[in-house]
Image (cartoon, grey):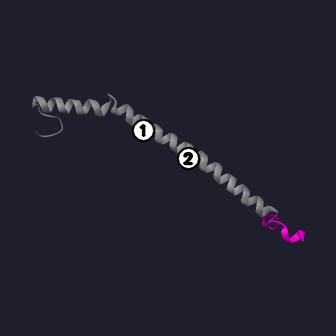
């Protein structure tokens, strides 16, 4: 009676069960760390873009072009 009620894991006991458990644990830890690194890198990229847009390179270049276009001056790098 007791032999039939035993769970399936006891039948796979030994090194195979440990290998499977360690594999899942390692995968979950690896995914967690990888996700943290990826999200940090993405945050870093968006932060640099935000810094560039806020009074940075893009902002200055666009404002210079619009000022020159309003004054009807020639824009460098392009024909007008």
The residue to which callout 2 is attached is 35
The image quarter containing residue 72 is top left
Q: Quadrant of the N terminus?
A: bottom right
71 w.r.t. 12: above or below: above
In the rendered image, residue 5 lying in the magenta stretch gets the answer yes
65 w.r.t. 15: above or below: above
Mark 1: few, some, or many residues within 10 Å (few <14, many ≥20)? few
Q: Quadrant of the C terminus?
A: top left
State the image coordinates of residue 21 (x, y, percent, origin top left): 73, 57
For label 1, the SS is helix
Marks 2 and 1, how far apart at CA: 16 Å
State the image coordinates of residue 77 (x, y, percent, origin top left): 18, 38
Horizontally, residue 78 falls left or right of residue 32, namely: left
The reply to whether the C-beta atoms of the residues labelled 2 and 1 are less than 8 Å apart is: no
The image quarter containing residue 18 is bottom right
The part of the chain drawn in magenta is 1-13
The image quarter containing residue 7 is bottom right
Magenta: main secondary structure: helix
State the image coordinates of residue 57 (x, y, percent, origin top left): 31, 32
Tell me what residue is drawn at x 51 percent, y 40 percent. 40
In the rendered image, residue 17 lying in the magenta stretch gets the answer no
The residue to which callout 1 is attached is 46
For label 2, the SS is helix
62 w.r.t. 5: above or below: above
User: Number of marks in the image?
Assistant: 2
Who is closer to the viewer here, 17 or 64? 17
Horizontally, residue 7 falls left or right of residue 65, namely: right
Which labelled disc corresponds to residue 67?
none
């Amino acid at each position: 009676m007791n032999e039939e009620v035993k769970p399936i894991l006891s039948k796979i006991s030994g090194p195979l069960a440990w290998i499977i458990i360690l594999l899942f644990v390692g995968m979950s830890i690896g995914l967690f760390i990888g996700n943290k690194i990826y999200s940090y890198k993405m945050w870093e990229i968006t932060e640099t873009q935000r810094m560039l847009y806020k009074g940075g390179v893009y902002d200055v270049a666009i404002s210079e072009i619009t000022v020159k276009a309003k004054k009807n001056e020639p824009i460098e790098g392009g024909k007008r």
